[in-house]
Amino acid sequence: MIGMLLNHQELNEFEYVLKKEMEELMYDLEDQKIDGIVKSVLEERYQIIYRLFCRFAKPADCRRYLRRKQRN
């Protein structure tokens, strides 16, 4: 188990970085030119970052970044 001590400003900065990373990943996942194998890796990365984000963020923010399962 790893713990982190963050003040309010650091928490806001951390949330900002996670949001930006998730937005970039969502953009890449919607790109039709990206191969399926790469998309599966991006989706896995997105899920890890999303779970980390949900530990800090408000529920409304978590719902905003929730991805629906894509069917092939």
Image (tube, rainbow, N blue to C red):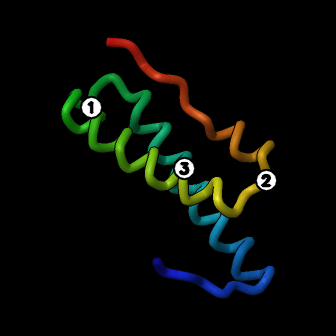
Quadrant of the image containing the C terminus: top left
Disc on the earlier residue, 3 or 2: 3
State the residue at coordinates (28%, 27%).
Answer: 33
* Mark 2 residue crowding within 10 angstroms, few (<14) / some (14–19) / many (20+): few
Element type at mark 3: helix
* Mark 3 residue crowding within 10 angstroms, few (<14) / some (14–19) / many (20+): many
Res 41 → quadrant: top left
Disc on the earlier residue, 1 or 2: 1
Q: Is residue 66 left or right of residue 47?
A: right
Tag 2: amino acid: Lys
Q: Is residue 49 above or below residue 40?
A: below
Disc on the earlier residue, 3 or 1: 1
Q: Is residue 61 above or below residue 64?
A: below
In the picture of the structure, the residue carrying the numbered disc 3 is 50
Element type at mark 2: loop
* Mark 1 residue crowding within 10 angstroms, few (<14) / some (14–19) / many (20+): few
- Answer whether labels 3 and 1 touch (C-beta < 8 Å): no
